[in-house]
Amino acid sequence: MEESAASSRPLIDPGWLFLAAGLGLLACVVIIPAQVDIAQAVAQRDRVHAAEVHREQRIARYAEFMGAIEAQEPMLIRSLAETQLNQIPADRGAIIPSGESAAGDASVFPALEPEPLVLPESTREVSRLERWCTEPGTRRWLILAGALCVLVGLLPAARPR
């Protein structure tokens, strides 16, 4: 009698399958929102790094300009005198600009500015499981389903009489 009972037992207890599915579901509910937070933090870090590199380029250009002013480079001093003070050397003639640039700004600062800052955008696809794990309403149901599967998996196996 014991031989027939032993031979009729399934190879794997079905409770283990419920336990594995429940633990997998609970792991997804915990890990996926953490990964979303990490991805957002990495994207924010990349944006801040791009802004820092842009500011460093800007500071380097202004420092180079200040160094040229302090060194009193003749070409720069002459250019600043012509554009800022409207003083033209006697051996040169005035160049009268035409068109829209005639009323332009004589400031040197736009030429010192680096290219406009382009912040990296984070684009990634959101899977259905990720959406279920991050939305509060469906997340509760996933936690409940995972806990129920773990409970069923931990129940003792039925024994034949």
Image: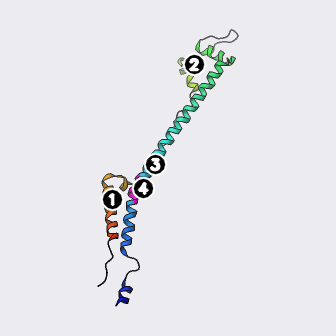
Q: Report the magenta residues as a range.
A: 27-33
Q: Residue furthest left?
A: 161
Of label 1 and label 4, which has the lower sequence position? 4
Q: CA distance from mark 1 to mark 4?
A: 13 Å
The residue under the point 68% across, 19% down is 71
Seen at 48% across and 44% down, the residue is: 43
Residue 128 makes an appearance in the image:
no
Q: Secondary structure at mark 1?
A: helix
Q: Could you tell me the amino acid type at mark 1?
A: Ile
Neighbor class of circle 4 (other Cα within 10 Å; few <14, some 14-19, many 20+) is few
Neighbours of disc 1 within 10 Å: few (<14), some (14-19), many (20+): many
> Comparing marks 2 and 1, which lies closer to the viewer?
1
Q: Where is the C terminus found, in terms of image quarters?
A: bottom left
- The reply to whether residue 43 is visible in this rendering is yes
Residue pointed to by mark 1: 143
Give the structural element (helix, strand or loop) at label 4: helix
Label count reads 4
Q: Amino acid at mark 4?
A: Ile
Asked if marks 1 and 3 touch (Cβ < 8 Å), the reply is no
